[in-house]
Every structure is written in C-alpha cells, then in structure tokens.
Image (cartoon, coloured by chain):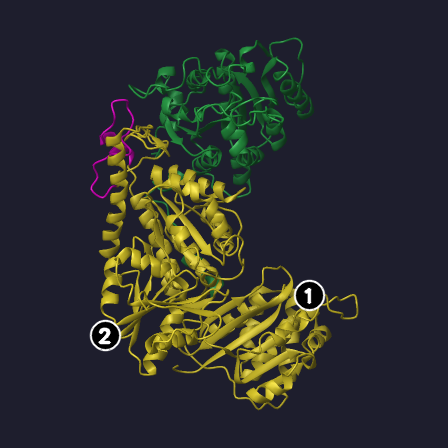
C-alpha cells in the first residue's frame, strides 16, 4: 500500500467541490474588502475539482506578503515560507515526491523582486509545478511601497519623486527564462482565471501565471480596473501560442499595453513538448523512477551503505 | 614520540598533479602497513603558485601532521614558466618556490630531491650554507628530463615518487598496483617505464642519509578518507538521499562526494542558483518526507541564515554543513580557521534552537554526521556540522570497520497514516501539527500526501494547525515548547553510552587543555609529549557546541588547576562560549590562538602550554597569540 494514500484519491472522488479546499471554521481571510487576492483564492478553489486533486495530495507553498496568506485560506498541505523563497522549497518537494500536486504562489515583490533569481532558475529548469504571482503593482502588506511591477513614474513613500525605473516585464522574463506555460489572468474575471489555473496545473512543466490583482487600499490607480481583453476570445489577436517568436511578440504587446491602459489576458505561450525537469532527471538516471519519499515508508527496501563505496579508498 | 615515522613533503605548483601524486603515495604507504596522515597547503588559484602536501607515515597511529618534516620532493612550478619563451619565468622567481619556500621546516639530517630540470638551487641565497648547517642530503635529479625521455613531461611526478621510493627503501610494486587501478593502455605503460627508469637511476647512486620508510602492519583493513568523506558517508548511512548546494571551498568536497554517489544510491543531488535556494531546497525535500542536507562555507552559510530560521520555526528537520575557512568576507578560501563558531551558533533572527556539532577527527565526522541526522529528524530541528578546511581535506588511514554500521533511514517523529487517523485533529479537519503539550517539545509531523495529515508549516508564529497567530498565550506556549526541545536533546546526549566529547591523557592530571574541532588530534599529541617530559596534562576535545556539554566541561575544569584553550581564531570564540555557558572558570582559562591560515603543530601547543605553566605571556612564535586568563 502506498504511504501516501491521499495521492490519487482525488480523481476517484467525484464529490470534491470548491468547499473541499475551504478550511473549516478558521481562519477567515484578513485581506481588505475588495482585494483581488479573493479572486485568486476563488479561482484556485474552483480549479482543484477540475483537475481532480484532493487537499491531502496538494502542497501549496507561498511567500510573504498579502499573497503569502493564500496558504492559510486554502485547505491543503501548505508551507508559508519566507519572502521570495517559495519556489526552491516547492521544487524540492516536487522532486522528493513527484506524485504530489505542487503549487507555489507569491506577490510581485516576492516573485519578481527578492525571489527573481529563483524565478529565473525554476523556469529554466522547467519543474512540473504551477506558479501564481499576484501582481498588484504595489507592496501591500508593508503598506504601499513601489514594487518591481509598479509603472515608471509611480509615486510612493519610497519613491516620492516617482519611480525612475521601468517595470519588470514578467511574461517576457518568464518566456526568456524557459517557462513552458505562460499566461496572464485577472481577479476581475474568475471564469478565465479558473480555466487558466486548471490548465496550468494540468500542464506538465513550469506553468507561470501572472495574476493581476487589484489593491483597493494602496494602488487605487492600478490598471486592473480597466476593461481587459481575452486574447483567445478576441478576433484582433491571432497568434500561435506554441510559437516562441509569436508568443514573445504578443507578450511585448501585452506588457506595453498594460501601461497604456489596455489589459490583454490569456495564454501566451504553451510548450507541451518540452520535458519537465523531473522527467529529464529520470531519463538520465539522476533521479529514481519511484517517488523518493515513498521509500522511507517501505519496510522491505534495502538501504545501501557507504561501506559499499570503500573499495576506492583501500 | 614512540616508534618510527617519516614525514614526506611534495611541493610544486597547483595544477601540476601534486594532489593526485601525493594521494597515490599515501595509499601506497597505507597498503604497506603504515598509519598515514596528510596535510594539504594550497593557494586559491587553479594553476601555479606554491602548493605542497605533507604525508606522515608511521608504524603507530598518528593524529596530526607533526612538526616539520624529513623528506622534500621539490618538483618545481611548471606554470610559473612560459614554455614558449625559452623557460623564462611568468611570475618572477615563483618557479623556485617549491624548493625555496619549504626549507624552514625541513628537519636536520633531512633529504631534498629537487627537479634540476626546472629548479636551480644556485638561485636560492644561502642554499649551500643551509644544507651544510642542517646536514641535509641533497639529490638534484633531472626529473623532467627523465619523464620526457621515457614518456611525457607531466610524468615527472612519477619520476619523483620513484626517486623517493628508491631513497627511502620502498619497493615499486605498490605504486605499480595503484597505477594499474587508475590507468590503462599507453599512459599506464609509459608511467611504469618512467617509474622503473627513475627508480633504477636513483638506486644506482650512493646515498649517505639515514631517512628510511618505517615498517608496520595493520591489525585490520584500512581505508584512506578525509573529513568530507566522513560527513558524506555518515549522511548516506543515515538515509540522507537529497542534497542541494552551491560550490564553495572547502564545503565543495562534501557536496561533490554526495553528488557523485546519490544517483547510484537512488537519491537526488541538486546544484542550484545560490545558497539561499540550496538550504530552501533541503527544507522542501525534508518537508516532503526525504532526509535532506545542504551546507556551505562561511560566506555561503551567511546566506542560509534566513532559511535556517524558517526550518527552526516550521520545525522542519534540516542538516547543514559549515566547512569553515579563514574570514571575514571571502577571507582566505583555501586556508583553515575556526572563526565562524559564533556565526554558526547565533546567525538568524530570534531565539533559536539549533544543534551544533564540531567533530574533532575524521572518525568523529562520520559519527557526528549520523548523530546530526538522528537529532534533526527525531527533534525536528536544524543541526549544523561545523568542520573546517583542515578536517575536510586531510586524508587519514583508519579501519574500514568504522564504516561497517547498519543504515538508519528512520524519519524520526513522523506519523503513519494509521496513527494520523487516531491523532487529535482540529475541528477544521487539520492535523494539530504544532501541539503544545509534548513533554520533550516534539510534536509528531505528517508528510504531504498522507491522508488526513494536512497542516500549514508557517514561518510566522502559528497555531497548532500552523495558521498565523499572535495571541500572547499561544506565542508563549509555542516558544516554550520549541525551547524545551533543546533541553530534551541535552538529556538525550547526556544519557548516551558514549559522549561526543573526547577526554585524553591521565584522568588525575593537574593541568588541562580544552580544544574543539579539528585541532583535537594535534592537542592530543602535545599532551603525550608534555606527559613524556614530566608534566601532568590531560585534554578534552569538545564537539557539542549547542547544546553545550556543561556537565562534562565543568567536571574537567574543576579537576585541573589551570587550562589552556586551543583554537584557530583571534577572538577566543570557544573560550567565550565556555565562559558564557558555565558562568565561571574565567580565571582558570587562558588561550592559545592561531589565525595565520595554518593549523597548529603539536610543538606550538607544547610551547604554549609551557608558557602558561611558567606564567609567561610571550607566545611561542610570532604567528601564535596568547590570551591570558581573566584577571591575569
């Protein structure tokens, strides 16, 4: 019998619904009224039944900030980690037990600022996991400082003269770094968000979602309030999501337009052919076929000893 | 000193194969029945520069590099020379260093073999006078020429080893055997030709020195290992199957040893983007139910301060290695120091509950690496193994039986699914992962994927289910419980049959020497010499840095009149820790400190001790410092 009997049970359980991922009596979200983070939570809870995963077979790792609290309000195994570090923690958990459904989430400061290095390398390695970045173009929990995605000229207590920096372009960065699924969605469209999260979880590789979330308290001017266009639903945008160059062009357009007042959302790049990191490692023999974590519960497994290595030292 | 011994030094430039040549020589000596101990000295540079390896071989067990040495094989620094420009030196007079730099420590009556194909003794001022004064026996040989003639220039190492063997009365068989193990085809054949030709050439000469290889016999089969092997093999035997790291000297030795073997052991090794990620990966793997480790050296370990705190707060088992080198900042990458003790003990924010072991020998590296895993997983706490560049790289011979132990893949305080179903859950359905009540502070954990075990591991202060909570009662209960673990670990370690502290010398000795980490063996040799000279001394090698072994050290200090504390740093960090933990004995302890990039030699400890006894405060030499006792 499997040591992790929760894994695989979700698919058989047709009863799973959004409530299955809602913690019982506590805690209640402490996000501000009108916060876009509620939209992420709702979309994620909606996606899980679609992919047929149960709370016990899911690990959600989050960073620090308002976004980091997602793991408190989503009922699964969780790790609320440190600022910017959810990715290295999540990807190791996936390597240790590839059967786990691993999702990481963080904010724009968390994911594109302090954790930028991890973002680049996790995308490059194409770990089979989903990464949701709450992008509200502001630091929320530390009370309204300029973030890496704040537009140029944005004024805040830390940039009183207006930011002199161009914002990070998360989609292009993600594509360049090597993510095999890149999408943008927004809290104001829960249906699209749910679909995209579902797809991202089902995608076999690193799926990055730049999730636009409005911050009604600190960033009232944020572009997330303006009408958005779903590129897959619009006749104006015809491009091949599996073509790197076309995807890159669309991403540039999206990122330019975001600050011109038009928000384009949807799937921008999907590569179904690239092997995930785990698959690559297994194919070169760098990683066992069976989940490593299972072995510790297998009483019959014969553990090798260092004594077997000593011939080289004699 | 009992029995006979030989200390051989091979010197050259980095990249000239000094390391591999000395390893083969060391192994040959071990196979011949001798106990061996090596000391590596190398610059932070890939090619060229002064590098040497010292090999001490004896018919009795040896614990340090010893003082000085008997035999110099000076190969010359081929990288100091521009091969295109008629032998003109690249780096001034650096090419002569393998000969010039090593003369100070060569003992009277010693032997010098140097490669006259590369080195010119006449360039060294006073060379002839010093040779005469010290009764050195000098054998210039054109090793380069010999190698060229019978093979390739790089084989001058082989020619040098053959010359050594001929001069000290060793057969060539063990060298040929070793070459057979490592080479094949053309390369093997030409190497053997070079070996034999050089051996014959030297053997035909007359020599007048009386340096010879000791003869010995082992009671049981020996292996040649260093501290990095000890740590890595201890981890493997304890069921560690995941490592994440970033290269940094000297931690790289542990990292690469693990990385080479983990795939064949069915484990996973990851070289990642930085040390923050490395420690975070180890935490992620451990959280998901795999025994995991990471590590670094000073600067890289500084980056791990943040994930270290996360492991403490989320009570995720984590084993880190800190292989110290001279600091601060980048310091001296290839030189040992024990300057990171306080960094290891206190880094990361908040009241912390980590465990720190500093093994004193290669064998202790193995033992305490295993113990670090046991404690980490049983008590859900980060444990740190503190070694240094000396311990990590020095090869020593020891019985293979040291490693002949059962594996222990036990994950420690983890529930099975059956136990989870019977355990108390919060009414929200979450498992009470961080319960307040356990006596030893350890609240059993569950692994993601286990049915009914879900909880949140948060770096914020949290409820028993892991949710963020700043309620004062909850805060106090959680802090108290986490802190109780350290007391429980202290009781656990105290209650074991064997202590990790190593007493040495006569129990009723009048005086004491306290030492920690890699200097333990050197101090023990000094203790033997002092007692032979009529002093009354014993030592205690302390390995437990946190929790501190208060009882054992108190008993030791109470039993002696005065005590010398030996460590490789300038601020007497271990003495400071001892005073802080015990709250007394300040007047009994003085320090012998060294921080020039080289470990202590036994003679320095002997002299330092004599000065302490005689009440002086002048250090034994300019490279060593005496810090008097409080009130002196």
N-terminal-most mark, 1 or 2:
1
Q: Nearer the viewer, mark 1 or mark 2?
A: 2
Image coordinates for residue A95, horizontal then vertical, percent: 47, 37
Against A272, is A94 above or below?
Answer: below
Residue B389: give x, y in percent of width and height. 48, 60
Identify the residue under disc 1.
B79
For chain B, give the colour: yellow
- Label 1 marks which chain's residue? B
Q: Name the residue beneath numbered marker 2.
A: B508
Residue sitting nearer the eye, A110 or B140: A110
Crowd tier of the residue under label 2, counting other residues whose Cα lies within 10 Å: few below 14, some 14–19, many 20 or above: few
Pick the quarter of the image with the N terminus of chain B. bottom left
Does label 2 lie on the same chain as label 1? yes
The residue range painted magenta reads B416-441
SS category of the residue bearing label 1: helix
In the image, B85 versus B425, the foreground residue is B85
Instruction: List the single residue furthest toward the front.
Output: B631
Name the residue at 25% across, 71% down: B560
């Amino acid at each position: 019998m499997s040591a992790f009997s929760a894994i695989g049970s979700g698919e058989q359980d047709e009863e799973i619904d959004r409530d299955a991922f809602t913690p019982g009596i506590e805690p209640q979200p402490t996000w501000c009224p009108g916060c876009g983070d509620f939209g992420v939570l709702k979309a994620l809870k909606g996606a899980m039944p679609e992919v047929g995963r149960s709370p016990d077979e899911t690990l959600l790792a989050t960073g620090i900030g308002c976004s980091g609290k997602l793991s408190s309000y989503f009922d699964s195994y969780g790790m609320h980690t440190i600022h910017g570090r959810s990715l290295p923690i999540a990807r190791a958990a996936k390597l240790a037990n590839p059967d786990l459904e691993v999702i990481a989430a963080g904010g724009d400061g968390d994911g594109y600022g302090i954790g930028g290095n991890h973002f680049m390398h996790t995308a490059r390695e194409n770990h089979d996991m989903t990464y949701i970045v709450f992008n509200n173009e502001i630091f929320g929990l530390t009370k309204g400082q300029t973030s890496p995605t704040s537009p140029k000229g944005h004024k805040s207590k830390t940039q009183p003269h207006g930011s002199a920096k161009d914002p990070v372009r998360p989609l292009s960065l993600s594509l360049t770094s090597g993510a095999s699924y890149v999408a943008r969605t927004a809290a104001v469209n829960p249906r699209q968000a749910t679909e995209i999260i579902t797809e991202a979880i089902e995608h076999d590789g690193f799926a990055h979602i730049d999730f636009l979330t409005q911050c009604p308290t600190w960033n009232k001017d944020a572009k997330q309030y303006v009408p958005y266009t779903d590129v897959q639903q619009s006749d104006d945008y015809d491009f091949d999501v599996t073509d790197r160059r076309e995807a890159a062009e669309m991403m540039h357009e999206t990122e330019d337009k975001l600050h011109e007042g038009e928000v384009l959302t949807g799937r921008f790049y999907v590569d179904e052919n690239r092997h995930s990191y785990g698959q690559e490692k297994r194919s070169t023999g760098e990683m066992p076929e069976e989940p490593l974590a299972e072995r510790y519960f297998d009483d019959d497994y014969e553990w090798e000893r260092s004594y077997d290595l000593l011939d080289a030292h004699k | 000193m009992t029995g006979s011994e030989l200390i051989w030094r091979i010197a050259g430039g980095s990249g000239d194969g000094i390391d591999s040549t000395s390893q083969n020589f060391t192994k040959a000596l071990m196979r011949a029945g001798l106990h061996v101990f090596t000391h590596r000295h190398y610059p932070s540079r890939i090619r060229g520069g002064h590098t040497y390896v010292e090999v001490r071989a004896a018919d009795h067990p040896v614990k340090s590099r010893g003082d000085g040495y008997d035999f110099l094989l000076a190969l010359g620094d081929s990288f100091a020379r521009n091969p295109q420009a008629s032998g003109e030196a690249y780096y001034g007079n650096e090419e002569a260093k393998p000969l010039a730099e090593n003369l100070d420590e060569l003992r009277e009556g010693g032997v010098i073999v140097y490669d006259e194909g590369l080195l010119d003794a006449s360039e060294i001022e006073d060379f002839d006078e010093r040779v005469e004064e010290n009764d050195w026996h000098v054998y210039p040989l054109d090793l380069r020429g010999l190698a060229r003639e019978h093979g390739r220039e790089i084989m001058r190492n082989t020619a040098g080893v053959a010359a050594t063997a001929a001069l000290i009365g060793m057969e060539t068989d063990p060298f040929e055997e070793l070459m057979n193990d490592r080479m094949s085809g053309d390369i093997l054949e030409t190497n053997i030709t070079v070996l034999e030709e050089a051996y014959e050439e030297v053997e035909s000469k007359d020599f007048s020195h009386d340096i010879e290889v000791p003869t010995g016999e082992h009671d049981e089969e020996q292996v040649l290992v260093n501290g990095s092997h000890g740590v890595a093999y201890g981890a493997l035997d304890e069921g560690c199957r995941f490592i994440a790291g970033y290269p940094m000297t000297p931690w790289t030795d542990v990292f690469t040893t693990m990385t080479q073997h983990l795939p064949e052991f069915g484990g996973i090794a990851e070289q990642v983007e930085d040390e923050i990620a490395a420690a975070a990966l180890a935490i992620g793997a451990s959280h998901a139910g795999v025994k995991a480790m990471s590590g670094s050296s000073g600067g890289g370990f500084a980056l791990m301060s943040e994930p270290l705190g996360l492991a403490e707060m989320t009570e995720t088992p984590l084993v880190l290695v800190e292989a110290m080198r001279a600091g601060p900042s980048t310091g001296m990458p290839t030189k040992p120091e024990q300057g990171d003790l306080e960094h290891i003990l206190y880094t990361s924010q908040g009241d912390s509950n980590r465990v720190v072991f500093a093994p004193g020998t290669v064998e202790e590296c193995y033992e305490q690496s295993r113990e670090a895993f046991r404690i980490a997983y049983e008590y859900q706490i980060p444990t740190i193994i503190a070694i240094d560049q000396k311990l990590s790289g020095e090869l020593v011979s020891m019985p293979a039986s040291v490693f002949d132990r059962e594996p222990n893949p036990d994950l420690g305080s983890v529930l099975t699914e059956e136990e989870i179903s019977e355990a108390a859950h919060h009414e929200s359905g979450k498992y009470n992962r961080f319960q307040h009540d356990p006596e030893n502070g350890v609240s059993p954990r569950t692994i993601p994927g286990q049915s009914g075990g879900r909880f949140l591991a948060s770096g914020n202060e949290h409820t028993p289910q892991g949710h963020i909570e700043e309620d004062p009662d909850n805060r106090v209960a959680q802090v108290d419980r986490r802190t109780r673990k350290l007391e429980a670990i202290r009781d656990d370690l105290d209650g074991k049959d064997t202590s990790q502290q190593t007493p040495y010398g006569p129990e009723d000795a009048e005086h004491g020497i306290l030492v920690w980490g890699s200097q333990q063996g050197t101090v023990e040799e000094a203790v033997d010499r002092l007692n032979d000279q009529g002093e009354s001394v014993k030592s205690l090698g302390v390995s437990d840095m946190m929790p501190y072994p208060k009882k054992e050290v108190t008993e030791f200090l109470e039993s002696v009149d005065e005590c010398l504390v030996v460590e490789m740093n300038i601020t007497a960090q271990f003495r400071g820790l001892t005073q802080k933990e015990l709250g007394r004995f300040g007047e009994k302890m003085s320090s012998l400190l060294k921080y020039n990039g080289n470990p202590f030699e036994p003679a320095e400890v002997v002299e330092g001790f004599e000065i302490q006894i005689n009440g002086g405060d002048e250090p034994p030499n300019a490279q060593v410092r005496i810090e008097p006792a409080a009130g002196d």
